[in-house]
Structures are given as C-alpha cells and as structure tokens.
C-alpha cells in the first residue's frame, strides 16, 4: 500500500486531476479500478498521514511542551510519564476533567501532568491564568487550581476567593502579576497550541497524540498506557 500513501501525500501537496494520476505512475488501470472499488481507503490513509504528521510536530516540540512553568505541575513532578493539559478556568469541560486527572494521578504514581494555561474563552480567563502562575511561584498551584474550578466562572471576586482559599500571599501575587512576567509564558502557550493543532480546551498531549475535549478517564488512561509502551 505504499503507493496509496504516496497518492495521499500528492493530494495534500495540492496535486489535482490528471496530475495526481500521472504522479509516480498512477495512470495504470489497476490503480484506478482499486480506488473506485475501495474509496474508503482514502479517508483511512489521510487519517494515518495526519497522525504521522502530528507525531512529527509533537516530537519537534516535545522538550518545550513538557517543560512546565516552575510549579505548574500536578501529580509527580519527577514522573516518568507526562501528560500536557491546555486549560482555561472558564471552561466547563476543563472543570469536568478535574476529577479525571485526580483519578489518573492516584492510579499512576509516576504520572506528571504539565499544566499549560490557555485562556481563550473570556478576558477574566487571562486574569485567572496569571493568578494560577503566581500561585505556582508560591508553591500553591494545585491548591489554587482546585479552588478556582470548585468556585466557578472566573471574575475578580471568584479569583480573589480562590487565591484566598489557596493561601496565597496576595501582595506578592499582585506584584508578580503587575510586573508582566507571566505574559510571555501565556503567549508561548498560545503559540504551542497553534503549532500542534489545539484550538479549544481542554487539549491534551499524551505521547504522540493530541486529544481534544473532555474525553473522560478511560480515553486518557488508554492514551497513557500507549505512551508507556512507546
């Protein structure tokens, strides 16, 4: 089936019509007959091609993806298996996934969850993301993360309440936020998300896979098991 993958690459590269058929000797009748009789192979081949291309993109960015903002890690900071989560505190699906991540961390003592703040849903999401990084600086990221999702939609009042519950030194947090030091990290998260094809939240990178949405514990656990074997 090597010719089929080449055919799909030609499609992706922008070849069309007779140019495709003439590419790499595709003009033979047997090839045309096979494709007409088995058109379902084309979507499958495209899916495989996209998977391989995605794997290459992740591989080229893995070191950057898996390097967290200091302290913005759940689970075992020295864990051998890494999950990267792109999240937004205004995202209801991210809130739904909190319990899944807690369960996965409990089940996998060597699991390291690198949190990437990806505030895209509302202006207050940015404020919450900045406070989360201020909490990470103070060694209280998990406490703020849990409190913020427990309280609900971020706004000035709920962010302050989550910070209070997490026990943050608010003077230090406000000073750090006011310095603008967290903004380059948030911008980098947006760039990484764009490069690997994440456009919404939650978005996950596990092994060579990008997974979109609140897919649930079982799907995430399966991806983690696959990553262990690779």
Image: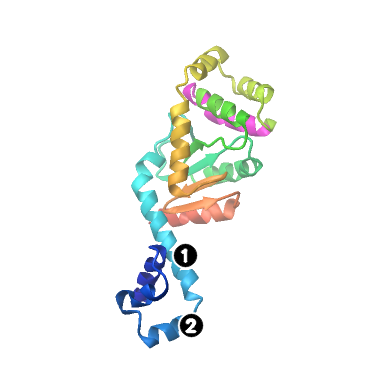
The residue shown at (61%, 30%) is 123
Residue to which mark 1 is pinned:
47
Q: Nearer the viewer, residue 54 or 85?
A: 54
Where residue 196 sits: x, y (%)?
Answer: 44, 48
163 vs 49, left or right, is right
Where residue 135 sits: x, y (%)?
Answer: 53, 24
Q: Nearer the viewer, residue 31 or 211?
A: 31
Answer whether residue 76 is visible to the viewer in this image. no
Give, as a single range, the part of the protein colored magenta: 135-150
Q: Secondary structure at mark 1?
A: helix
Residue to which mark 2 is pinned:
36
Where residue 7 sits: x, y (%)?
Answer: 38, 72
Q: Secondary structure at mark 2?
A: helix
Distance from the alpha carbon under mark 2 to that under mark 1: 19 Å
Structural crowding at the residue carrying mark 2, measured as other residues with C-alpha within 10 Å and reported as few (<14), some (14–19) or many (≥20): few
Q: Which tag is nearer the camera, tag 2 or tag 1?
A: 2
Q: Is residue 144 magenta?
A: yes
Q: Which mark is residue 146?
A: none
């Amino acid at each position: 089936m090597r010719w089929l993958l080449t055919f799909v690459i030609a499609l992706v590269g922008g070849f069309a019509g007779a140019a495709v058929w003439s590419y790499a000797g595709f003009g033979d009748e047997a090839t045309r007959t096979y494709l007409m009789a088995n058109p379902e192979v084309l979507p499958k081949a495209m899916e495989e091609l996209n998977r391989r291309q995605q794997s290459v993109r992740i591989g080229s960015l893995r070191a950057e993806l898996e390097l967290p903002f200091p302290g913005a890690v759940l689970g075992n900071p020295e864990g051998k298996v890494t999950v990267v989560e792109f999240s937004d505190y205004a995202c209801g699906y991210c809130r739904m996934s909190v319990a899944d991540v807690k369960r996965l961390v409990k089940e996998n003592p060597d699991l390291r969850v690198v949190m990437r703040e990806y505030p895209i849903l509302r202006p207050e999401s940015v404020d919450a993301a900045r406070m989360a990084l201020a909490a990470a600086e103070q060694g209280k990221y998990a406490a703020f993360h849990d409190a913020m999702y427990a309280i609900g939609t971020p706004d000035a009042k709920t962010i302050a309440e989550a910070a209070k519950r997490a026990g943050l030194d608010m003077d230090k947090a406000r000073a750090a936020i006011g310095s603008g030091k967290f903004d380059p990290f948030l911008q980098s998260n947006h760039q990484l998300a764009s490069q690997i094809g994440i456009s919404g939240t939650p978005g996950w990178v596990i092994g060579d896979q990008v997974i979109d949405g609140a897919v649930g514990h079982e799907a995430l656990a399966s991806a983690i098991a696959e990553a262990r074997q690779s």
